[in-house]
Amino acid sequence: VIRSLSNGGVIKVSKPGVYRIQGASANSRFKDYLRDEGGIEMQDNITLLLSNGVIFKQESTFKDQYNIIRIYNKSNVKIQGGQIIGDRYSHGSKSGEWGYGIAISGGQNITIKDIKISDCWGDGINIQNVIRSNILLRTRGVNIERVICVNNRRQGMSIEGGEMIRIKESEFSNTNGTSPESGVDIEPWHHLSSVNDVIFDKCIFANNSHAGLISGGSAPISNIKVKNCFFSNNKINKAFGGQCTFYKYNRDINISNCKFNKGSDGSIYGVSLFDSDGVNIFSNRFQNCTFNIAGINQTRNVSLKNNEVVFTSNFGTELLFMNHDRNDDLFENIDFSDNIIDIRRSPDLNYNIYFKFKSGKVEGNVFKMNKNKFIHKGRGKINMSNNKF
């Protein structure tokens, strides 16, 4: 059993095989997730290389929490290659949700790449800040590249705090078992634990039991970019959002050049916004799904431009863009321009578009509608011009 690594240098595990890891802590005082306990303890300036065929496997435990690999307030750490497998099929109890494949808590300049993480009792990867003796230890500079998080129980990856986080060419799929069941959940756990400057590029979010990507929590979330990504068949109920959902304390969000596909039983909303400020959704393609803006509190400064919504199958249901039961004053400075909405191949679909906001514009859009065309304008100051039906 590998328990810890000495400080500095490169450690390579070359021999293929299953290496049993004791990620749980026998005497932990914590009732939820482990802090600086359990599993393989990474140190500063360590590179851990796992060859093909190397599997780190969590030993079966009845504990609610474990860390197979932990990075606690460390810098210049790299983990590359191999597989990490949790104990979801041999776990000794039904309680808990904090069994993590890789736990990153504080530190900077951390790289995780070319690794598959599956079957964890909680999250494949968990990233968060640490508050120790009333001092915030921020996680800064995390690079995740070509990582697959699949069939984990709570989340493929949780981002509960941190900044300058880059996720590239990675997959978050088939999350199922305990709520929230999302591919990636950006959810600050503490009012001091904000999330800032996160980029998803060329990632896949598919077949999760809730959202592919969901963002909202107890602290501000800002400067999030989602580009060149693919969302498919994420099963979040449309009453709660879309396959990509931003719902609380979000600002400065950009979603561009992504593809959203409803799939066989995914959400009919590709993107949903609740209570967000400064959002740009542009140059995306939505197949058999669409986008939606809703909110209980203020949603403002939202631009939806150059998107294409195409329904290729017949859906006998109703879609709402801009929830019709909200007050116009909740939505301000909304720019809905140069989009294409094509539902001609879904003759039974009722596509209700409610342009109910305090101020904004609806310009240059092309609506290729079926016989059920419903465009509703609210009482706010809205410039509607040059739209084609």
Image: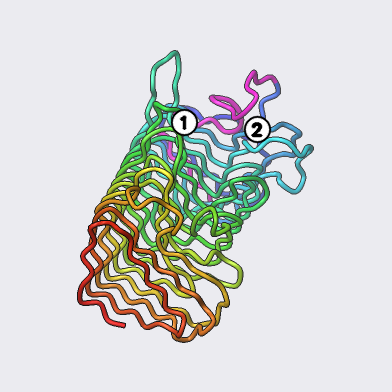
Question: What span is in magenta?
Answer: 27-51
Which x, y percent locates residue 51?
Answer: 53, 52
Quarter of image, res 8: top left
Q: Quadrant of the C terminus?
A: bottom left
Left or right of 156: which side holds 198?
Answer: left
In the image, residue 197 sits, relative to residue 308, either above or below, namely above
Residue 123 is left or right of residue 271, and the answer is right
**Taking the image as drawn, is residue 208 in sight?**
yes
For label 2, the SS is strand
**Residue 65 - label:** 2
Q: Residue at x 25, y 77 (%)?
A: 387
- Between the residue at mark 1 and the residue at mark 2, the CA separation in whole angstroms equals 15 Å
- Residue found 31% across the figure and 62% down from its top: 256
Look at the picture and state if 289 lies above or below 179: below
Q: Is residue 17 left or right of residue 291?
A: right
- Judging depth in this view, the residue of 164 and 322 nearest the camera is 322
Name the residue carrying label 1. 105
Q: Label 1 sits on what residue type? A: Ser
Residue 37 located within the stretch drawn in magenta: yes
